[in-house]
C-alpha cells in the first residue's frame, strides 16, 4: 500500500479555504483507494489485521468528512453563502496571512471560533506511516487552521453575518495579540471582594429539607480555605472569558462601527441574551453599554446630519433602552465581575486602541463611503463599489460601509424600498425586506470580487488572461 | 448628463463610458461590480454569476403555464450557488438559468438587448433568449443557458458570456416596479403573476384561480 501511496502526489493544504477543502477531498479519495487496494491484497489474510486498518481509515475519513466536508458551497445544501465565506477568508488573512479558514455548519445557534496549529501533524500522527499527505519541496504549509462554526439559522441574514464577521474574527485578533490575556492578569480580586464572595457562598444552602432539620449550607460542609480556592478558580475563568468578549467587542466596534452595535443589540433580543450574565459571556446589556461609550469617544455623536446622523438617532434610542432596563437575578460573582470590568474599562479601552492602531476607528474614517452606500441602496443598487473623487475609477466598497449603510437604510429609508417594489401589504413588505437582504449580500459579493479582481489584474500583463472581445 | 436628441440610436462608446461614471445616480448606468469593462460598438460585456437554477425531475405529468403555481414551480427547480472560483458544468441539451455577475441599473433613457457572445455561441452555448431590458430596470439579468453542442461545457463565474447592446430610449423610462425588479439571482418564470393567464383560462373553460395542487 505504501507503494500505491508514494506513487501518487498528494497536495498539501495551501492557503485558502477552497484549496484546503480540495486537498482534503483528495486525501479522502486516496485513503479510500489505498484501503481498497489493501483489502484486495489482504483477501486471504486474517480478519483482525484488516479490521485494524479498516477502523483506522474509517475514523480518519469520518473525522475529515464530519468536521470539514459538510461545508461545501457547490450545492444548494450550503449553509453559508459563499460571498460571506470570501469575506471571512479575507478578514482572517488580515490577522494571519498564513492561515486557512474552515467554515462549518453548526446547529447550536451561536457562532464560535477556534484556532488550531499543526492540524496536518495530527493526521500524520493518526495515520502513522500510511499517511497520504506529502509535502512538495518548497511548499509553504498554513500555520494556523481556523474553524468558524456557522449556525444554520443565520444562513441568509446579513445582520448576523456582521456579528460573525466582526466579533468572532476579532477573537482571533485578540488571541494573536494576547490583549485580553494581558489585561486579565491585572484584574485580581481585592481582599474585600473575595471576603464578600466567600461569605455569600458560605451561606448558600444546598440539598433539600432533611425532615425536621434545616438544609445544609456550604459553610457547614467546607472549610473557608476550600471555598476561597473554589471562588478563586471560578473568578479566574469568568475574568478571562469576559475580558475576551469585551476586547473582541471593542475591536469589532472600532472596525465595523455602529453596525456591530445594532447587530448585537437586535441579536440579543432575538436570542434573549440581553440581561443574563453567564460565566462565559457578560450580558449583552453590559457589552452594549461599554460599546456605546466607545462609539461616543470615536465621535459618532458629532455627526448630526446625513447617514451617520440617522445612525446617531437610532443609537440614542438604544441608549435609552439600556439605561432604563435593569438586569434581574444577578449572581454575586457576576455582579463583582461587572464592577471590575466597569472599573477597568478605561484601561481595556486604551489597550484596544493601542492595538487597533486607529485614532477614531475605521468606520468613522469611512463616513463618506457610508453616505455613498446609503445613496446606492436608496437607488435600488447594491453598494458594491464607490466612485473615486477623480470620477473615473470605481473601488470596492469597504465591508464596514456596506453593513452600516444597511442598518441606516433600514432605520430611515425603507419607504424608498417599498415604493420601488410597489410593496403595500405586510406580506409584500416582508418580501421587500428579503430582497434588501439579498441586495446587501450581492454588495458583499461584488465588493469582494472587485477587490480580488483588481489585485490579480495588476499582476496580469495587458492583453493576457482575458477572452477576446467579439 | 442627458443624451443629445440628435444622437444615434446606439450610444457611442464614449457616451457609455461617461454614463458609467456619471456623478448623479439617476444618470448613471450602474453595472456593478465593474471588472475590466470591455466597451465596443455601444455594447458592454457582462459576466456569468454564481447562482444557477437547473430543472428537476418530478412526479408532475407536465408543466402547464396556465396551471402552474409557485409551489409546483419550486418543486421543479434545483437552485445552486457556487463560489466565484468554482465551476458549473452544463451538459449537452441541458438548460440552466443563471444570473449575471453584474447588477444592472439602467437610467431612464437607456434600454438594452442581451446577446450571447459569439465566442460561446460557436462552442454551442446559447446564452440569452429574452433579449430586451427596459429602461429603469434594476437587478441581475437572468441568462437562459442551453448547451446545443455535443460535449459538456465548463462554465466559470466571471467569464464574459454575453453582451449588453444599448439603445437610446425616447420615453421617460421611469423605474417600474415589477415581478423581476431588484432580483439578485436567476428567476424561474412566474406565470402565476401574468394577468393574461386568467383570461386564457376562462376562454378555455377552466375554473377561476389555479386548480388545487396534488401532492
Image: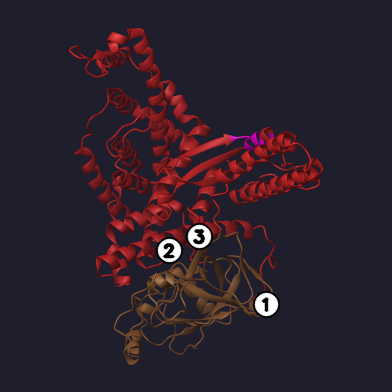
Residue B127: image x %, image y %?
57, 77
Q: Nearer the viewer, residue A242 or B17?
A: A242
Q: Label 1's element? A: loop
Q: Residues within 10 Å of mark 3 (few under 14, many from 20)?
A: some
Of badges 1 and 2, nearer the viewer stands 1
Tell me what residue is drawn at x 59 percent, y 67 percent.
Answer: B36
Q: Is residue A19 left or right of residue B13?
A: right
Q: Is residue A56 left or right of residue A244?
A: right
Q: Is residue B32 among what the camera can see?
A: no
Residue A121, magenta (yes or no): yes
Tell me what residue is drawn at x 54 percent, y 49 percent.
Answer: A70
Of badges 3 and 2, nearer the viewer stands 3
Please state the extent of the stretch shown in magenta in the rendering.
A117-124
Task: Give the red chain's letter.
Answer: A
Q: Main secondary structure of the magenta part?
A: helix
Q: Are marks 1 and 2 on the same chain?
A: no
Residue A31: image x %, image y %?
70, 45
Q: What residue is disc 2 on? A: A382
Residue A76 disc label: 3
Q: Is residue A256 among what the camera can see?
A: yes
Residue A328: image x %, image y %?
22, 32
Q: Indicate the chain on which mark 1 is placed.
A: B
Sequence order check: which comes first, mark 3 or mark 2?
A: 3
Residue B123 disc label: 1
The image quadrant where one finds the C terminus of chain B is bottom left
Residue A428: image x %, image y %?
29, 68
Q: Label 2's element? A: loop
Q: Residues within 10 Å of mark 2 (few under 14, many from 20)?
A: many
Q: Indicate the chain on which mark 2 is placed.
A: A
Quarter of image, res A281: top left
Q: Is residue B6 above or below residue B35?
A: below
Task: Give the brown chain's letter.
Answer: B
Amino acid at each position: 500500500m505504501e507503494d500505491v501511496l508514494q506513487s501518487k502526489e498528494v497536495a498539501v493544504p495551501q492557503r485558502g479555504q477552497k484549496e484546503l477543502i480540495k486537498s482534503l477531498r483528495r486525501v479522502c479519495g486516496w485513503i479510500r483507494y489505498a484501503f481498497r487496494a489493501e483489502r484486495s491484497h489482504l483477501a486471504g489474510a486474517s480478519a483482525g489485521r484488516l479490521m485494524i486498518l479498516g477502523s483506522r481509515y474509517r475514523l480518519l475519513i469520518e473525522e475529515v468528512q464530519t468536521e470539514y466536508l459538510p461545508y461545501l458551497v457547490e450545492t444548494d445544501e450550503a449553509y453559508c453563502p459563499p460571498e460571506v465565506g470570501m469575506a471571512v477568508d479575507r478578514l482572517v488573512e488580515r490577522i494571519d496571512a498564513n492561515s486557512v479558514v474552515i467554515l462549518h455548519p453548526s446547529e447550536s445557534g451561536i457562532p464560535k471560533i477556534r484556532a488550531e496549529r499543526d492540524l496536518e501533524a495530527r493526521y500524520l500522527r493518526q495515520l502513522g506511516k500510511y499517511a497520504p499527505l506529502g509535502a512538495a519541496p518548497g511548499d509553504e504549509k498554513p500555520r494556523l487552521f481556523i474553524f468558524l462554526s456557522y449556525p444554520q439559522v443565520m444562513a441568509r441574514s446579513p445582520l448576523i453575518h456582521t456579528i460573525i464577521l466582526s466579533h468572532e474574527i476579532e477573537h482571533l485578533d485578540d488571541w494573536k495579540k494576547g490583549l485580553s490575556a494581558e489585561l486579565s492578569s491585572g484584574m485580581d480580586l481585592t481582599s474585600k471582594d473575595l471576603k464578600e464572595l466567600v461569605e455569600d457562598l458560605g451561606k448558600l444552602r444546598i440539598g433539600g429539607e432533611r425532615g425536621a432539620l434545616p438544609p445544609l449550607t456550604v459553610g457547614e460542609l467546607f472549610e473557608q480555605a476550600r471555598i476561597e480556592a473554589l471562588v478563586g478558580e471560578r473568578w479566574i475563568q469568568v475574568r478571562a472569558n469576559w475580558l475576551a468578549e469585551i476586547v473582541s467587542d471593542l475591536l469589532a466596534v472600532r472596525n465595523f462601527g455602529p453596525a456591530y452595535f445594532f447587530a448585537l443589540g437586535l441579536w440579543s433580543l432575538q436570542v434573549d441574551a440581553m440581561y443574563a450574565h453567564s460565566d462565559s459571556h457578560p450580558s449583552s446589556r453590559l457589552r452594549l453599554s461599554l460599546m456605546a461609550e466607545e462609539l461616543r469617544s470615536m465621535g459618532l455623536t458629532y455627526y448630526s446630519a446625513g447617514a451617520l446622523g440617522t445612525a446617531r438617532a437610532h443609537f440614542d434610542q438604544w441608549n435609552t433602552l439600556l439605561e432604563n432596563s435593569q438586569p434581574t437575578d444577578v449572581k454575586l460573582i457576576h455582579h463583582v465581575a461587572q464592577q471590575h470590568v466597569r472599573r477597568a474599562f478605561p484601561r481595556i479601552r486604551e489597550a484596544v486602541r493601542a492595538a487597533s492602531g486607529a485614532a477614531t476607528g475605521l468606520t468613522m474614517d469611512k463616513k463618506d463611503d457610508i453616505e455613498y452606500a446609503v445613496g446606492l441602496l436608496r437607488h435600488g443598487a447594491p453598494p458594491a463599489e464607490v466612485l473615486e473623487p477623480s470620477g473615473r475609477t470605481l473601488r470596492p466598497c469597504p465591508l464596514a460601509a456596506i453593513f452600516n449603510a444597511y442598518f441606516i437604510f433600514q432605520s430611515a429609508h425603507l419607504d424608498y424600498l417599498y415604493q420601488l417594489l410597489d410593496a403595500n401589504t405586510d406580506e409584500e413588505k416582508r418580501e421587500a425586506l428579503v430582497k434588501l437582504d439579498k441586495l446587501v449580500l450581492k454588495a458583499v459579493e461584488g465588493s469582494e470580487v472587485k477587490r480580488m479582481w483588481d489585485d490579480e489584474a495588476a499582476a496580469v500583463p495587458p492583453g493576457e488572461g482575458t477572452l477576446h472581445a467579439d | 448628463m442627458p443624451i443629445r436628441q440628435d444622437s444615434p440610436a446606439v450610444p457611442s462608446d464614449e457616451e457609455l463610458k461617461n454614463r458609467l461614471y456619471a456623478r448623479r445616480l439617476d444618470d448613471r448606468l450602474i453595472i456593478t461590480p465593474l471588472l475590466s469593462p470591455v466597451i465596443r460598438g455601444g455594447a458592454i460585456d457582462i459576466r456569468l454569476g454564481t447562482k444557477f437554477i437547473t430543472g428537476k425531475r418530478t412526479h408532475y405529468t407536465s408543466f402547464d403555464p396556465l396551471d402552474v403555481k409557485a409551489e409546483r414551480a419550486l418543486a421543479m427547480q434545483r437552485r445552486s450557488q457556487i463560489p466565484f472560483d468554482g465551476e458549473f458544468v452544463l451538459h449537452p441539451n441541458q438548460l440552466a438559468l443563471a444570473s449575471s455577475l453584474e447588477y444592472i441599473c439602467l437610467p431612464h433613457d437607456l434600454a438594452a438587448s442581451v446577446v450571447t457572445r459569439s465566442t460561446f455561441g460557436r462552442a454551442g452555448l446559447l446564452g440569452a433568449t429574452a433579449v430586451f431590458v427596459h429602461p429603469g430596470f434594476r437587478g441581475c439579468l437572468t441568462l437562459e443557458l442551453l448547451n446545443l453542442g455535443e460535449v459538456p461545457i465548463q462554465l466559470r463565474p466571471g467569464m464574459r458570456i454575453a453582451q449588453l447592446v444599448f439603445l437610446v430610449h425616447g420615453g421617460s423610462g421611469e423605474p417600474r416596479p415589477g415581478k423581476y425588479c431588484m432580483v439578485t439571482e436567476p428567476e424561474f418564470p412566474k406565470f402565476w403573476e401574468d394577468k393574461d393567464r386568467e383570461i386564457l383560462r376562462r376562454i378555455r373553460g377552466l375554473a377561476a384561480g389555479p386548480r388545487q395542487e396534488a401532492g
